[in-house]
Amino acid sequence: MTTAPSRREVLALTAAGPFCLARASAAPTLLVAPAPDAPAHDPGPGQPDRTERLAAVLTALNHDLFRFAARAEAPPASDSALLRAHDAAYLSRLKSASPKDGYASLAPDAIMSPGSYDAALKAAGGAVLAVERVMRREARNAFVASRPPGHHALPHDAMGFCFLNNAAIAARHALAVHGAERVAIIDFDVHHGNGVQRIFWDERRVLYCSTHQAPLYPGTGAANETGAFDNVVNAPLRKGDGGEAFRAAFEARILPRLDAFAPDLVILCAGFDAHLHDPLGGLRLGEADFHDITLSIMEIAARRCGGRLVSLLEGGYRPEDLAASVAAHVGALMEA
């Protein structure tokens, strides 16, 4: 039997190079992605959320080091799943706005191409599928590689490259369909997930925790934003902060709250735009930081919910660094 590498071994592999990040694990990690021929979301030239992002991630995850992971194609999300997080009027407007050719703008930073609506449905559907497999224990944990991202999407509007709030849809599905009593959403994108916070502001059953750079788009996520039931934890970081400050924020504010909440499922908004080379942020994290914090979250998930964890791709806008960061993250997931 092939055994999973230890934490020390994987950190050593991380230091050795961006793709020497994972070995086989007897416990299945599920990788969810759109079908190779699925329509692509292309917001047009000059946009940071370009198609090369996902292509780089999928190339990294097709490396032989991830051969023991299970694989699944993302299906479109059902109307019932979408309606748990979004207004019916908005969903109708989103569908109607989908262009047959060219581009359509729902917001200055939310531009649709002919493939965007289908891609958004499958990003949300992939999140739901991952929750299904993890809650049924068909997979120990899961990573969903998809575009467009989701954590800025509001119940009634698109925002910040996001059309559907994948994390919120996934959490609502776990609560409504699988009888989860508590779901924790942990967000380490460089930008605050204002959409997730808005949706769950007054939801006792959901804990939302975020590290992010502040001040920065979208301007939310102050430490005094704590939710209607003290169910929101924001740990803002300053421009120039690196791995030490990032880990300190998690260890002081987020990990203790996650542990005390004792969720039935952990969902990650896994943004990698806090990388030191990312063009949209000012934090200074490296691949090993993403790997290490993933392990720390997994340790609590193992103790509190049998390791049930679903990770959803959010930001990361330099494709080569995004690919290496995702590989480090998934390498950690495969240690379960």
Image (tube, rainbow, N blue to C red):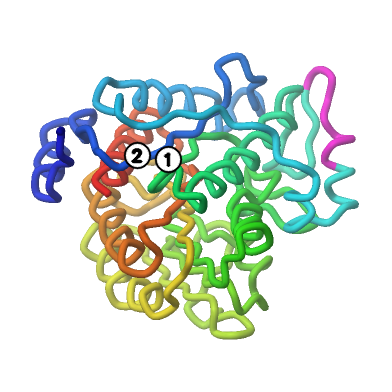
Q: Is residue 323 left or right of residue 10?
A: right
Q: Quadrant of residue 329?
A: top left
Q: How far from the left and from the top, in percent, is residue 310?
A: 46, 50
Residue at left 72%, top 57%? 154
User: Decide: marks 2, 1 in contact (CB < 8 A)?
Assistant: no
Residue at left 65%, top 75%? 203
Marks 2 and 1 sit apart, C-alpha to C-alpha, by 34 Å
Is 68 colored magenta in this rendering? no
Q: How far from the left and from the top, in percent, is residue 31?
A: 44, 34
The residue labelled by disc 2 is: 28
Badge 2 local density, few (<14 within 10 Å), some, or many (20+)? many
Q: How far from the left and from the top, in percent, is residue 40?
A: 63, 22
Amino acid found under the numbered disc labelled 1: Pro
Q: Quadrant of residue 178?
A: bottom right
Of pointers 2 and 1, the one earlier in the residue sequence? 2
Q: Is residue 285 left or right of residue 133?
A: left
Q: How far from the left and from the top, in percent, is residue 23?
A: 20, 33
Element carrying mark 1: loop
| Picture layout, residue 23 above or below residue 51 | below
Amino acid found under the numbered disc labelled 2: Pro
Please state which of residues 131 and 11 is positioned toward the viewer in this rendering.
131
| Picture layout, residue 19 above or below residue 171 | above
Please state which of residues 98 and 299 is positioned toward the viewer in this rendering.
299
The residue labelled by disc 1 is: 279
Q: Residue furthest bottom?
A: 229
Element carrying mark 2: loop
**Bounds of the magenta segment:** 94-102
Please state which of residues 168 and 45 is positioned toward the viewer in this rendering.
168
